[in-house]
């Protein structure tokens, strides 16, 4: 017993095998999340002390195989070959043995010590599947331990098995046998590869050999540069020629068939399946939920339910958070003397921090909903049902869920794109989510529509805006797939896992995990950006303006002609006018005037320009900025009648302006919070720049078209 | 009217099957990544599959294979040649 020894264990297995639940059952809450270096693949680690050893567990990404195509698979296999964990735990879904064992056969080729956790054993027992463990273990060459992550059984057996291997009381011995034509050639290739000492010190020769026969790109690249390649290559050519002529298939297919044959053989001997017709609840549920008639309605109902839960339910904690921050703001307002410091604290810091935290309930609820969907297995069905529509625009069925979330807020929608495995799917979805009109834009729409359109058409105009957003999103996806992501088509091939009930604990863990990710990275940047924007809207200040209004204030205060109430209302009016003029003087104000020539063709003047610039902080700020510029102070977001009247009566604006403004707000770059999260998810500056340029470009074009065309008719 | 020796127009592929059809896989003509994916999921010669349903919009198709449920797009299913059972 070596007390100082640290043991590294990796968990490998199919998606939906309960691997992560088993991982959680083993290490408990003692977990740490990071990234595998260089890729957007999550790395989850945990550790525990057992019988004097410190054991580190790494949960590898779920994979069906160890091929070289998806980043997850590459990460999983590289971790096993390069980082060399002491032991691998192969987690298999006991109720789905045949497919799960396919990965097992590949692990055997890696010649690393591993044990098998036959997970979901409770389901195995329910299905009355009988397993002869002794025989099974001798066939596969290692310990097979029944576990149930749900009921927390078998955990100690797993740990004991690990310790036994470490203490060399047990040694796995793999003997997967394939047909002799393969085995002989693999042996021969092994001998050749062993001649390259450097190579065979790092990788198991058998694994390299099999992968070479399988045309594995990464292994090819590895061996290609070695001097041994010439000998290797001639053997590969011979093998393929042989198999083509004798079996009509290349070596890759033969090997796959052999793996399956091995699995079938082992199962035949060691496992007795219950041949009685069993009630398959999953298939029953599917009959109800995804049949030709109910499929689409159930999908939309589910999306609607998520939406309600995330945004309606989320409103309560949102309001609590808002009131807490208002409260803090009030305290600061009443206690701090220095006006600048007060403004910085209240509007900059407290406003900024509040602006970050206010997203938290939505994010947590959204991820709770997504974790539930994924955990139950319905997520796969949702993608299955809607894929045809998505695919016709170059997207994946799973994109639909992220896009629909975007109707509430882009921030959680961006984060939800992690469920998309393919990079091109994910980035494309990220790029088009902002066109799904987020909740913060609604106050702007209501203000403008209410000002320029009759009540009878108002509802239709609003609906039209949302529709335009959806269409532009879908066609942009098509555009991206035809240009930037050309030729990058990912297979849809997807398992529909059995319906299961996820444990509340695992749901809570996932919810908390995503929320803390958001807080850690996005929050700091959003906060800094908020302060910068505050600076931009409040500085520089003009002494002249301040002095001018102070003088006017003095006049009002000293005058005898008015009552106290009248004086107070005059003072309030003066304060608003002063704010309006100061805003024009500030950095943001000047920016607004600076861009005026660019936005004139859209029908905007510098006043709308300023509000659009300020909208980068958050779309709802567009309304408050318009209100300030028109000297109306704190308008409520329900479309203050007087503000609407002012807009309508202003000669610079018309219905054409309204339409182009609506289009511009719909399409231009989302708020700084969303942009920050976008960058975090897309990871490359190149994409963030495309994101900014594309949205601004589209916004300008459509607003321009909208304005010019409407002007022709009116 | 004449028939060619190797009448390939009679070949049945997975995409042609209807709900409830049982079939045995003959071979796959997929290339590249899709080929590996299909093989990884067990769509190889000799395996029996059952078509459960097509999605409400007609695509993708859901099949039962080796005891689990798999969905794939028709454009992917076109690569798999089968023999009806």
Image: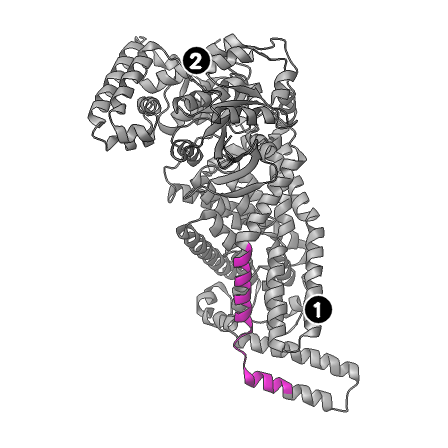
Quadrant housing the C terminus of chain A: bottom right
Q: Is residue A1 visible?
A: yes
Report the side of A636 relative to B79 (left or right). Answer: right
Element type at mark 2: helix
| Residue found at x 29% / y 33% | A221
Q: Position of residue A238 (x, y in %)?
A: 23, 17
Foreground pick, A79 / A357: A79
The disc, 1 or 2, on the residue closer to the chain's N-terminal end is: 2
- Residue A532 highlighted magenta (yes or no): yes
Asked if residue A42 is positioned above or below residue A599 in the image, the reply reads above
State which mark lies toward you, 1 or 2: 2
In the displayed structure image, the side of residue A310 where residue A263 appears, left or right: left
B45 left or right of A621 in image: left
Q: Main secondary structure of the magenta part?
A: helix
Q: Which residue is mark 2?
A: A262
Image vertical order of residue A383 relative to residue A473, above or below: above
Pinpoint residue A649: horizontal percent, then vertical percent: 62, 70
**Chain containing the residue with disc 1:** A
- Which residue has dot 1 on it? A330
Q: Is residue A617 found left or right of A450 in the rendered image?
A: left
Q: Nearer the viewer, residue B48 or A643?
A: B48
| Residue at 62 percent of width and 66 percent of height | A624
Q: Label 2 near label 1: C-beta < 8 Å?
A: no
- Report the magenta residues as a range: A523-550
Residue, x 51% and y 19% (percent of image)?
A143
Q: Chain of mark 2?
A: A
Percent of width and height locating residue B58: 53, 26
Query: Quick check: A587 above or below A571?
Result: above
Residue A90: x %, y % from top left = 50, 25
């Amino acid at each position: 017993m070596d007390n100082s020894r640290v043991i590294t264990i990796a968990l490998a297995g199919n998606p939906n095998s309960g691997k992560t639940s088993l991982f959680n059952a083993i290490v408990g809450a003692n977990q740490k999340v990071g990234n595998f270096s260089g890729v957007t693949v999550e790395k989850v680690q945990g550790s525990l002390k057992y019988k004097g050893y410190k054991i580190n567990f790494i949960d590898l990404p779920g994979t069906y195989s160890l091929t070289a195509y998806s980043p997850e698979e590459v990460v999983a296999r590289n971790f096993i070959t390069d980082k060399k964990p002491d032991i691998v735990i192969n987690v298999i879904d006991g109720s789905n043995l045949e497919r799960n064992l396919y990965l097992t056969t590949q692990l055997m080729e890696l010649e690393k010590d591993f044990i098998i956790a036959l997970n979901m054993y409770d389901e195995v027992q329910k299905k009355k599947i009988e397993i002869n463990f002794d025989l099974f273990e001798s066939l596969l060459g290692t310990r097979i331990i029944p576990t149930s992550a749900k009921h927390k059984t078998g955990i100690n057996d797993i740990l004991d098995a690990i310790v036994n291997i470490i203490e060399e009381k047990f040694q796995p011995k793999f003997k997967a046998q394939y047909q002799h034509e393969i085995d002989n050639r693999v042996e021969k290739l092994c001998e050749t590869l062993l001649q390259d000492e450097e190579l065979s010190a790092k990788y198991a020769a058998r694994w390299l050999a099999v992968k070479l026969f399988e045309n594995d790109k990464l292994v090819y690249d590895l061996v290609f540069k070695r001097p041994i390649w010439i000998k290797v290559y001639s053997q590969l050519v011979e093998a393929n020629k042989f198999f083509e002529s004798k079996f009509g298939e290349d070596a890759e297919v033969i090997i796959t068939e052999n793996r399956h044959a091995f699995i079938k053989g082992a199962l035949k001997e060691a496992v007795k399946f219950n041949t009685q017709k069993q009630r398959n609840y999953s298939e029953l549920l599917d009959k109800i939920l995804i049949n030709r008639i109910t499929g689409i309605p159930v999908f939309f109902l589910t999306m609607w339910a998520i939406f309600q839960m995330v945004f309606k339910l989320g409103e309560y904690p949102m309001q609590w958070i808002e009131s807490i921050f208002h409260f803090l703001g009030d305290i600061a307002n009443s206690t701090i003397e220095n006006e600048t410091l007060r403004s910085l604290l209240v509007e900059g810091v407290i406003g900024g921090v509040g602006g970050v935290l206010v997203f938290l309930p939505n994010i947590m609820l959204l991820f709770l909903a997504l974790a539930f969907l994924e955990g139950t297995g319905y997520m796969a069905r949702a993608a299955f049902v809607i894929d045809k529509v998505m695919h016709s625009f170059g997207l994946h069925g799973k994109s639909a869920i992220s896009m629909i979330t975007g109707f509430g807020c882009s921030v959680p929608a961006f984060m939800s794109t992690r469920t998309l495995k393919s990079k091109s799917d994910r980035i494309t979805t990220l790029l088009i989510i902002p066109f799904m009109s987020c909740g913060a834009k609604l106050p702007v729409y209501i203000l403008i529509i209410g000002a320029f359109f009759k009540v009878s058409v108002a509802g239709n105009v609003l609906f039209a805006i949302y529709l335009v957003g959806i269409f532009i999103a879908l066609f942009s996806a098509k555009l991206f797939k035809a240009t930037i992501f050309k030729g990058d088509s990912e297979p849809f091939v997807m398992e529909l896992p059995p319906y299961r009930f996820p444990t509340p604990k695992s749901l809570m863990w996932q919810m908390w995990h995503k929320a803390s990710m958001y807080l850690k990275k996005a929050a700091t940047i959003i906060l800094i950006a908020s302060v910068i924007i505050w600076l931009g809207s409040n500085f520089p200040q003009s002494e002249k303006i301040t002095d001018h209004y102070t003088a006017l204030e003095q006049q009002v205060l000293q005058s005898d002609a008015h009552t106290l109430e009248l004086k107070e209302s005059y003072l309030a009016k003066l304060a608003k006018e002063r704010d309006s003029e100061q805003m024009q003087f500030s950095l943001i104000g000047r920016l607004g005037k600076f861009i005026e020539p660019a936005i004139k063709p859209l029908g905007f003047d510098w006043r709308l320009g300023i509000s659009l610039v300020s909208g980068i902080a958050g779309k709802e700020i567009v309304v408050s900025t318009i209100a300030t510029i028109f000297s109306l102070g704190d308008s409520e977001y329900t479309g203050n009648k007087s503000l609407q009247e002012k807009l309508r009566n202003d000669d610079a604006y018309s219905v054409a302006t309204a339409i182009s403004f609506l289009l511009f707000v719909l399409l231009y770059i989302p708020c700084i919070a969303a942009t920050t999260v976008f960058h975090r998810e897309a990871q490359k500056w190149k994409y963030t720049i495309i994101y900014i340029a594309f949205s601004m470009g589209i916004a300008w074009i459509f607003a321009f078209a909208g304005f010019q065309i409407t002007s022709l008719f009116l | 009217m004449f028939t060619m020796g190797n009448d390939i127009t009679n070949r049945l592929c997975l995409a042609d099957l209807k709900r409830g059809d049982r079939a045995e896989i003959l071979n796959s003509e997929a290339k590249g990544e899709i080929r590996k994916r299909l093989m990884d999921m067990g769509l190889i010669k000799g395996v029996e599959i059952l078509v459960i349903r097509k999605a409400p919009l007609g695509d993708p198709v859901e099949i039962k294979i080796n005891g689990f449920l798999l969905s794939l797009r028709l454009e992917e299913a076109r690569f798999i040649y089968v023999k009806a059972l």
